[in-house]
């Protein structure tokens, strides 16, 4: 891990003008305060960013980057289904004809691709992902342009509704990326496919989430049965997902990825999008998408 990465992760837990949090011992209160931190976040109305999907396959590292955008007012995600890797490495099977026909039910493979199996166009699928996803700790916060309603401000006592959902245990206070953090262990008491958190690290000074481990990731696809580690960072005063790393190898479409990760790069607020968003969802075999929040 580079010094710049470590600094970025540390900054995620040190927002300006935040008073140190009192020492806590009740794990449910720590979890409630971390969720309240998410609820206090405000985001730009329009974001652009790149989603980098990296895999280690056959001893070779490969990365695909997808231009993406997020509209905080509607919660809509837009993505260019053609990655930079695909533009630089177009599929060109040797021999035979190489053409693609768009039929009424989608794309009909070329004759040459029927003769020789081709590797997946997208390593793990096209990522329809927002960088401010909270993994069930809170609903997606409002855009900065939205005026908060005082009646909806986070109330910690309201967090007790999660009592029947997770059994929360305080493992201890640990140093993570040079930051003192509460380490929580979470056990879903029902619907483990929906309540997926297993571990959470919370900044002991600000109560901002630093890192978590979840049982599974995404709605469908190769990563759903694999645990993932998620890290957060602060960008322009707001909390975002920094990266998500698979903690076990992933098999997909006949290939074995010994390591796989997804990172959010160049997250930035924009007034207008730099390119028009695709009018329709991509017609691809697999889309990586997070489930609706509880």
Image (cartoon, rainbow, N blue to C red):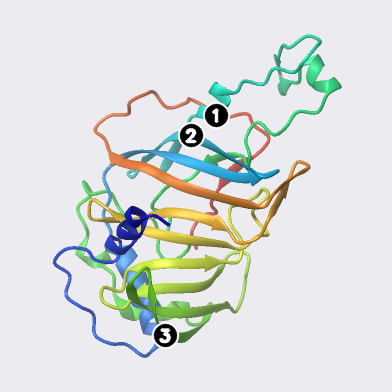
Q: In the rendered view, tell whether residue 137 sits above or below residue 53.
A: below
User: Residue 128 shows which numbered tag?
Assistant: none
Foreground pick, 139 / 134: 134
In the rendered image, the vertical position of residue 84 relative to residue 290, given as above or below: above
Dot 1: few (<14), some (14–19), or many (≥20) neighbours within 10 Å? some
Location of residue 279 in the rendering, given as x and y in whole percent from the top left corner: 48, 25
Residue at left offset 37%, top offset 70%: 35
Which quadrant of the structure image shows residue 88? Answer: top right
Drawn side of residue 263 relative to residue 123, left or right:
left
Asked if residue 35 lies left or right of residue 117, the reply is left
Front-most of residues 48 and 85: 85
How many dots with numbers? Answer: 3
Q: Secondary structure at mark 1?
A: helix
Q: Which residue is mark 2?
A: 66
Q: For residue 85, which numbered disc appears in the image?
A: 1
* Residue 205 image position (x, y, % from top left): 26, 76
Q: Could you tell me which secondary element the residue under label 3 belongs to? A: helix
**Tag 3 residue:** 27
Along the polypeptide, which appears first: circle 2 or circle 3?
A: 3
Local crowd size for mark 2, using a 10 Å CA cut-off: few (<14), some (14–19), many (≥20): many
How many neighbours does mark 3 have within 10 angstroms: few (below 14), some (14-19), or many (20 or more)?
many
Outermost residue on the right side: it is 115
Figure quadrant of the N terminus: bottom left
In front: label 2 or label 1: 1
Q: Position of residue 130 (x, y in %)?
A: 43, 47
In the figure, 265 relative to 113: above or below?
below
Q: Residue at x 55, y 31 (%)?
A: 281
What is the CA distance from the residue labelled 1 to the residue labelled 3? Answer: 44 Å
In front: mark 1 or mark 3? 1
Residue 22 image offset from top left, x and y in percent: 24, 85
């Amino acid at each position: 891990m580079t010094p710049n990465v470590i600094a970025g992760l540390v900054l995620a837990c040190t927002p300006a003008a935040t008073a140190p949090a009192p020492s806590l011992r009740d794990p449910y209160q720590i979890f409630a305060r971390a969720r309240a931190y998410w609820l206090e976040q405000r985001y730009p109305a329009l974001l652009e960013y790149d989603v980098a999907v990296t895999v280690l396959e056959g001893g070779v590292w490969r990365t695909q980057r997808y231009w993406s955008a997020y509209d905080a007012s509607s919660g809509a995600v837009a993505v260019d289904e053609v990655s930079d890797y695909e533009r630089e490495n177009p599929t060109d099977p040797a021999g035979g004809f190489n053409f693609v026909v768009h039929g009424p039910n989608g794309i009909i493979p070329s004759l040459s691709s029927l003769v020789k199996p081709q590797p997946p166009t997208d390593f793990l699928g096209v990522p329809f992902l927002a960088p401010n996803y909270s993994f069930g700790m809170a609903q997606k916060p409002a855009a900065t342009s939205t005026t908060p309603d005082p009646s909806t401000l986070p109330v910690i006592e309201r967090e007790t509704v999660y009592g029947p959902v997770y059994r929360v245990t305080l493992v201890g206070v640990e140093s993570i990326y040079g930051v003192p953090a509460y380490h929580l262990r979470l056990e879903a008491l029902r619907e483990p496919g929906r309540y997926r958190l297993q571990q959470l690290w919370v900044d002991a000074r600000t109560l901002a989430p630093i890192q978590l481990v979840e049982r599974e990731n995404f709605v469908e696809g190769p990563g759903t049965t694999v645990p993932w580690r998620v890290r957060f960072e602060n960008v322009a005063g707001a909390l975002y997902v920094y990266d998500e790393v698979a903690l076990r190898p992933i098999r997909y479409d006949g290939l074995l990825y010994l390591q796989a990760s997804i990172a959010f790069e160049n997250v930035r607020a924009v007034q207008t999008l730099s390119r028009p968003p695709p009018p329709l969802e991509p017609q691809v075999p697999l889309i990586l998408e997070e489930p609706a929040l509880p």
